Amino acid sequence: MELYFAPLEGITGYIYRNVHRDLFGGIDKYYAPFVSPCHNPKMKGKEIRDLLPENNENINLIPQILSNRAEYFIKGTKQLYEMGYTKEININIGCPSGTVVSKNKGAGFLRELDLMREFFEEIFNWRDSDYPDLLISVKTRIGVYEPDEFPGIMDVYNDYPISELTIHPRTRAQFYKDKPNLEAFKYAISNSKIPLVYNGDINTVEDFNRIKNYCDGVDKFMIGRGLIGNPNLAAQIKSAAPVTKEELKTYHDRLYLAYEEVMQADRHLLFKMKELWTYLSTSFAEEKKAAKLVRKSQNLSQYHSAIGVIFSDFTVRD
């Protein structure tokens, strides 16, 4: 069984990945938040900093590209290959963001199946010619509006040598609402020619066991928000003990100090930590109180007071 850490823009950057790997582990692959190559000759500066090899030593990191144009994907992949990412590149065809979908990227690409075929045709012909050992994987949703779009989408994927297909079984219209459509994933199990990875709503060991029992024969799972809320979740699924309050405190403090080193303004640091607590508060029995305490903090002094109360008085969920 393999467990993958899903990318989450603004959270799972290189600072986060390094702290998580050092303290918890249990992850077989970390996927980086997407980069989006464009007409520029190369990605540079902030858009590529997260992927610099010196920022990701000893991490099995898979870059993710968001694109619906083969020429941009190929250009970006060449640059990443030269940086040392010679094993696998992932294509994001699942992002539900409105600004992404409006450009027919991410989940928006799912409404242009003929263009998707042209895209795959070109990138795999190039890959087979120039980089035959490079794996190209895909992360997808099951449709834009309705689950009945999924069989046609699977037909496209099945026609190409995709190394792994990670399926988040919701439509773009659902974003992260409602329950994952496990029947759609079961359809993929029966009809996919590609090795599958399940992704969606794995927040506890119980969630994992329930979904694994349903996904017969699938042994690769991608976890996102559940791992940010409980950073020990992957290790716990692989038989580690439940996370303790002391471990969460160490995790928080390491992240805080690491972000403090690179952020020039207290306001930015406060917003970054508030974003983290959107998920981390779920590790506490007093989840709503913890989230409210952090949310009400208007400066770092108030933030530290809130954190002191949480780690002193609140209880980690069983």
Image: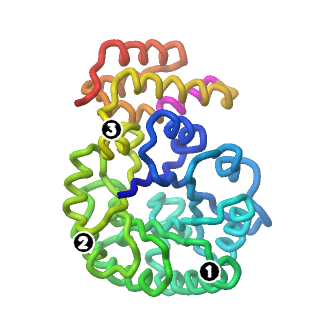
Q: Quadrant of residue 80?
A: bottom right
Q: Name the residue that disc number 2 marks.
A: 186
Q: Is residue 267 magenta?
A: yes
Identify the image quadrant of the N terminus. bottom left
Indicate the position of residue 284 as horizontal and vertical percent values: 30, 27
SS at circle 2:
helix
Task: Please state which of residues 98 and 153 is positioned toward the viewer in this rendering.
Answer: 153
Q: What amino acid does circle 1 point to?
A: Ile
Task: Please state which of residues 39 and 51 is positioned toward the viewer in this rendering.
Answer: 51
Q: Give the range drawn in magenta.
A: 266-274
Among the two numbered marks 2 and 3 on one chain, the one whose residue lies closer to the N terminus = 2
Among the two numbered marks 1 and 2 on one chain, the one whose residue lies closer to the N terminus = 1
In this view, 64 is above or below 288? below
**Mark identifier at residue 123:** 1
In this view, 300 is above or below 135? above
Residue plotted at (58% across, 73% down): 68
Density class for disc 3 (Cα within 10 Å; few <14, some 14-19, many ≥20) is few
Judged by its main secondary structure, the magenta piece is helix
